Amino acid sequence: MAQARTDIGPPLYKDMLPPVIKENYGKWRYHEILKPGVLVHVSESGAKLYTVRAGSPRLISIYFIREICDLADKYCDGYLRFTSRHNIEFLLTDESKIDALIEDLKAMGIPVGGTGNSITNIVHTQGWVHCHTPATDASGIVKAVMDELFEYFTTMKLPAKMRIALACCLNMCGAVHCSDIAILGIHRTVPRIDHENLHKLCEIPTLTASCPTAAIRPNPKLKSIDIKAERCMYCGNCYTMCPSVHIIDAKNDAVSIWVGGKISNSRIGPRFSRLAIPFLPNNPPRWPEVVDAVKKLVELWAANAQPGERMAEWIERISWEKFFELSGLPFTDKHIDDFTLAQTTFRSTTQFKW
Ligand code: SF4
Ligand code: SF4
């Protein structure tokens, strides 16, 4: 039966697979890292697929795309793919072409790496370029951080893999909830309500329902809403529903840093990232405070973790108390996860041993 065609969404991925993947679909036995940035996948039939992983600067021009497509035509029968971390993966079946491809990439200034015990490209959200609720930028901050961590992309000298993510608000359509180091843009003020225009632009029941903490109540007198400030967690969800509830605050929006998240089950189970630094200034165009903080955390972990130990595993071995001590980061009331109890206590866990 012919497949339905629509104009919504991307084309079916299976139509674009290289022949070697189509022929060995579901039959891949194992993969190995041959050297930084180069992988081989081996199938049950003995077929081999070589992958050369290259970094991209994320925001790229049509000229850049044409150049990498020319490389794919030259070395890979036209096949490449982008990963969710904005790496470009060239897919080859001829091993003898790998070194020439890497030389061409280097000549274009494109690094090869991001495999094994490295820092691969940072996954991030949309930032100031596209989304409406960001508390910080995404591509700009990530570029500044990755420029500083560049050597860890092209080598595999870290104790384990390091995954960094950025989300520009806490709705986090990125992966900050489960990354070794997460950079998270935060709003810190209650939305400002434009009472005059709200009823012309927004549906009040939808707006009220959009608040995860029930901080919003209708205000029939003004044909608007009120926000109970002490219940607000500055998530900006209401602004997503209604442009008359302004959350963006150039002066107070900031950046926080979280650590110790992972999604893999190896060694210890998956973990959510936890707050390490509640506030860093939003300082474009190069965010020096954020870059410095992330670099220090990477280097602290690299200097102290045992081989194979990811950030979460290292911290849990030495204890979170010791992590704060070693990193010199102050432990504040912002670190205590007791939002629902915030009005009655600053301490909801007996696990902390201060
Ligand atoms: Fe938009 Fe928030 Fe996603 Fe950033 S993290 S793109 S502000 S929803
Ligand atoms: Fe509710 Fe979030 Fe809006 Fe605050 S910012 S009122 S918590 S939806």
Image (cartoon, rainbow, N blue to C red):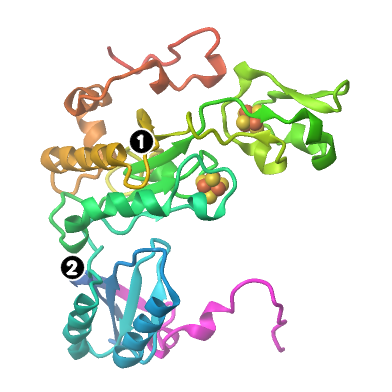
Question: In which quadrant of the rendered image does the C terminus lie?
Answer: top left
Q: Residues within 10 Å of mark 1 (few under 14, many from 20)?
A: many
Residue 94 falls in which quadrant of the image?
A: bottom left
Residue 8 shown in magenta: yes
Task: Give the amino acid at mark 1.
Answer: Ile
Residue 146: x and y in percent read: 28, 54
Is 291 placed left or right of 191 in the picture? Answer: left
Question: In the image, which residues are magenta?
Answer: 1-30
Is 102 rendered above or below residue 307?
A: below
Q: Main secondary structure of the magenta part?
A: loop
Q: Nearer the viewer, residue 307 or 260?
A: 260
Q: Earlier in the sequence, mark 1 or mark 2?
A: 2
Residue at point 20% right, 51% down?
160
Q: Residue at x 25, y 71 (%)?
A: 110
Q: Is residue 146 inside the magenta stretch?
A: no
Residue name at image x 33 percent, y 81 percent: 91
Task: Report which residue position mark 1 lands on.
Answer: 257
Q: Which mark is residue 36?
A: 2
Q: Using the image as rendered, state which of residue 239 and residue 44 is in the foreground.
A: 239
For label 2, the SS is loop
